[in-house]
Amino acid sequence: MRKPLVVDITAAFQELNNSVVDGVPGVWVVHSKQPGPVVGITMLTHGNEPSGLATYHYFRHLYQLEHRLKRGSVYFVLNNPEAAKRYFTAVAIADENAKRRARFVDVNMNRLPDDPFSGDNDQRYEVKRARVLRGIWARFQYALDIHSTIQTTRPMIIKLARSDMKMISRFPISTVISNIDAVQSGKPACYFYGGQRSQVYGIETGGHEVKRSLQRAVMCTRTFLALLNLIPVNRLPGLKDQVEYRVFDSIWFPDASYELTRALKDFGVIHKGQLLARGDGQSLTAGTDCCALMVPRRKKATNIDEEVFFLTRMPRHLKRKK
């Protein structure tokens, strides 16, 4: 990607949202004429995280994947179109509060029930959308779920239970988060991608509307497809030394009276015995030396129905053999 990436994400959203594959809106697919893996590139699992749209625009209009895909198939999927629609409505009127609220409609799509496909009793929007996407998601043998962050923090690779570290060692991101899917409440949307042997990865590209986040989304996707030998490449990106933060626990507020004793920073060190939060009940303290991850912007949590933040082991350096 030698030329600067220029993309109108609003137009990209509208175009992808109007694309239909096998009766499912919000999906665009490229099939090659050669057998190979089926790959899913998913975006806007949270409606206010638009960086993945840059990959759709790039591979459809700039890279022209339809003419360059060597083998297999690649699906580009808009996971949460209704939340995304609310986000872009808020963008049009510059309503920052509405943009933040557009993360989801009824339930965080990364906190789905263990089985969202059993019956039609659960009518929450994200659960219904999961049922619509079930047939598309089931095809994925490899998948990359693209996110961005509201905070100014470092980009991250989310290593899930079905991720292969060899794949992500060439991504242009130095920070790896592991084991979060085993600790978090509910199931992330990507838990339902493919079968048990499917390899699933997530990335946090950086700030929601930062140009570099869009570029990083494209770079990671190009690397992903190149490593799978789906697109031609002169030379793969070099192996990258990375730092792993392994999630082992999370902090929940018992009720709305609780707030942090002080503002925390992502990846900031927390010491054993440190007082973390106070409320009407028992104060919350750290049981061991660790690091904070995905901390709230303020001392008060905006949503106590989810983890307020996660705790990780102290960082472990992953040295790569060149």
Image (spheres, grey):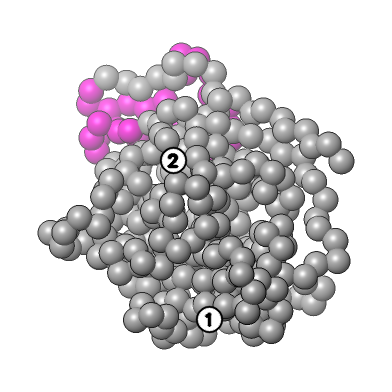
Relative vertical location of residue 191 with respect to residue 45 in this rendering, above or below: above
How crowded pointer 2 is (Cα within 10 Å; few <14, some 14-19, many 20+) is rated as: some
Say whether residue 234 is left or right of residue 227: right
Q: How many marks?
A: 2
Asked if residue 264 lies in the magenta stretch, the reply is yes
Secondary structure under tag 2 reads helix
Front in this rendered view, residue 114 or 153: 114
Determine whether, in the image, residue 235 is placed left or right of residue 217. right
What residue did someone put label 2 on? 181
Q: In which quadrant of the rendered image does the C terminus lie?
A: top right
The answer, for residue 127, to whether it is visible in the render is yes
Give me the residue at 33% from left, 40% from top: 185
Q: Quadrant of the N terminus?
A: bottom right
The image quadrant of residue 32 is: bottom right
Task: Indicate which disc residue 24 carries.
Answer: none
Side (left or right) of 40 relative to 298 = right
In the image, the segment drawn in magenta is: 252-281
In the figure, residue 165 lies in which quadrant?
A: top right
Percent across and percent down for residue 201 are: 55, 51
The residue that label 1 is drawn on is 12
Of the residues shown, which amino acid type is indicated by label 1? Ala
Q: CA distance from mark 1 to mark 2?
A: 30 Å
Residue type beneath disc 2: Asp
In this view, 274 is above or below 298: above
